[in-house]
Amino acid sequence: MTDELLYTIDGHVATITFNRPDKMNTITARMLGAMSTCLLEADADPTVRVIVITGNGRAWCAGLDVAAAASGDGIGGDGGSGGNGEFNLRDAPPVVLHKIDTPTIAALNGGAAGYGMDLALGCDIRIAASTAKLSAAYTARGLVPESGGTWLLPRIVGWSKAAELLYTARTLTAADAADLGLVSQVVEPDDLPAATAALAQEIAANAPLAVRASKRLMRHAMSENLEDHVHRQFLALLQLFRTNDFREGLMSYIEKRPAEFHGR
């Protein structure tokens, strides 16, 4: 673990915080490894129902730390990767974000650029401060998205708009991102923590097994035809019908009271 990436749990919400404000929260390989570890740990923790990812300072994540890479602490350097000089991109946070079943919220307190934009796109939900920006400036640097951006972006905004953003290397304001559906809410910077907490609590109040199953089903739906997917949904329902949470959800509805779910 590293003090450049903070991990806390409050109730049912785990929070991962980029903590390099003096470096615009740019990421080293050591931070990438720590982030993957935190995501997997949170996903395996039965008390965690939502994961929030945010940053300290005026940036959310300005991408990979190029200077660190040059000194051997970036992708391709040792960087805490076990001394083998490599970082396994298949275990990189954007891929882990897609594989885990716990809902994820990117609370964009500031700019997300390059690898940072890939990370933001990998989260299920994005809430942005009005001052935040999303920068798809890959081609302006002679590069392509580092980890999943070309897979994620067309699925979120459609092929035509994704092509426009990537080919022009455009930077979007929070309002632009909301218009495209890249973020679901835009709030004033001081209101971001409260808005994020409110959304996280709203998710956490629902049956966690059903929420996780919903995310898992949406992930499978991206590569299945309708007939196969409906069959998968039916199998998921059969499992959920046998849970205490289903019985609690049904009884709370009949008794007209808030449900108390325990993930069983």
Image: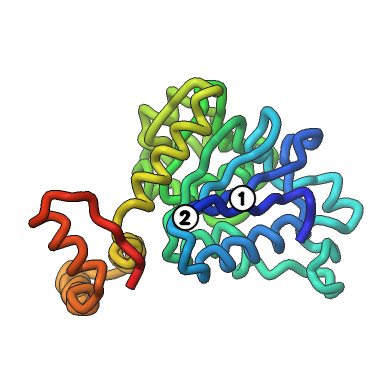
Judge left or right: residue 12 versus residue 62. Answer: left
Q: Is residue 143 above or below residue 178?
A: below
In the rendered image, residue 85, in percent from the top left (x then y), is placed at 83, 69
Q: Is residue 17 above or below residue 46?
A: above
Residue type highlighted by circle 2: His
Residue type highlighted by circle 1: Ile
Question: Tag 1's secondary structure?
Answer: strand
At a point 80% along the width and 33% down the height, the residue shown is 22
What is the number of callouts on the image? 2
Task: Give the image quarter of residue 175.
Answer: top left
Q: Which label belongs to residue 12?
A: 2
From the viewer's side, name the closer residue of 56 and 225.
56
In the rendered image, residue 21, in percent from the top left (x then y), is placed at 75, 35
Question: Tag 2's secondary structure?
Answer: loop
From the viewer's side, name the closer residue of 127 and 7.
7
At a point 35% along the width and 65% down the height, the residue shown is 262
From the viewer's side, name the closer residue of 264 and 214.
264
Q: Residue furthest right?
A: 71
* Distance Cα–Cα, label 1 vs label 2: 13 Å
Judge left or right: residue 189 versus residue 251. Answer: right
**Does the image show residue 120?**
yes
Judge left or right: residue 238 versus residue 189. Answer: left
Q: Residues within 10 Å of mark 1 (few under 14, many from 20)?
A: many
Please identify the quadrant where the N terminus is shown.
Answer: bottom right
Task: Give the image quarter of residue 140.
Answer: top right
In the rendered image, residue 135, in percent from the top left (x then y), is placed at 58, 34
| Tag 1 residue | 16
